[in-house]
Each structure stands twice: as structure tokens, then as C-alpha cells.
Image: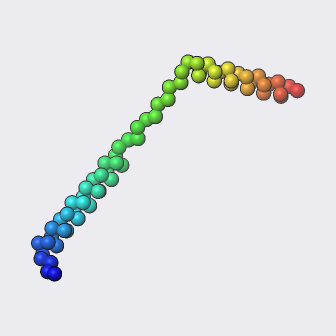
Amino acid sequence: MTINPFQINGVANVYNKFLKQRINNLLENDNKEEPQDTVSISAEAKKRSIINQAKEEVLKTIRESE
């Protein structure tokens, strides 16, 4: 089987294109900022959280005074 120089050149060009695309993709991914996570808590959940914190503080105070 004979391999012609233009075939080697073609393979080298395809490989070079692949490497350039990969490098560009890596650079683009580095420049992207991470999306911000947002959490919304319902009014009912906030109310329950405050009540639980108050309960814990009261119980802690009672335990410390004993």
C-alpha cells in the first residue's frame, strides 16, 4: 500500500483543525461564568424557620438555667 504525501498532508490538516477546535472550546469554557443559583423560600417556610429558631433558643435558655 502506498501513502501519498497529499494524504499525509490531509490527515495532518484534519488533526490540526481538531486540535484548534478543542483548544478554542476549552478557552471558551474557561471564560464562561458559572450560573448563579437562586433559591426562593416561601413565606410559610420563612415563618416555620423563624418559629423553629425561636423554639431552639428558648429550649437552650431553659436547659442552661437548670
Q: Quadrant of residue 16?
A: bottom left
In the displayed structure, 27 sits above or below 48; it is below
- Write the residue at 85% across / 25% down: 65
Left or right for 40, reference 45? left
- Write the residue at 68% across / 24% down: 53
- What is the residue that sits farthest to the bottom in this orientation? 1
- On the image, the x and y values in percent for residue 40 come to 50, 25
- On the image, the x and y values in percent for residue 25 come to 30, 52
Q: Quadrant of residue 52?
A: top right
In the displayed structure, 27 sits above or below 60; it is below
- What is the residue that sits farthest to the right in this orientation? 66
Left or right for 18, reference 39? left
Question: Which quarter of the rendered picture does the C terminus lie within?
Answer: top right
- Write the residue at 61% across / 19% down: 47
Nearest the eye: 20 or 45: 45
Question: Which quarter of the rendered picture does the N terminus lie within?
Answer: bottom left
Left or right for 23, reference 43? left
- On the image, the x and y values in percent for residue 21 come to 25, 55
Left or right for 32, reference 51? left
- On the image, the x and y values in percent for residue 37 come to 46, 34
> How many circles with numbers are drawn on the protein?
0
- What is the residue that sits farthest to the front in this orientation? 1
Name the image colouring: rainbow
- Write the residue at 38% across / 41% down: 33
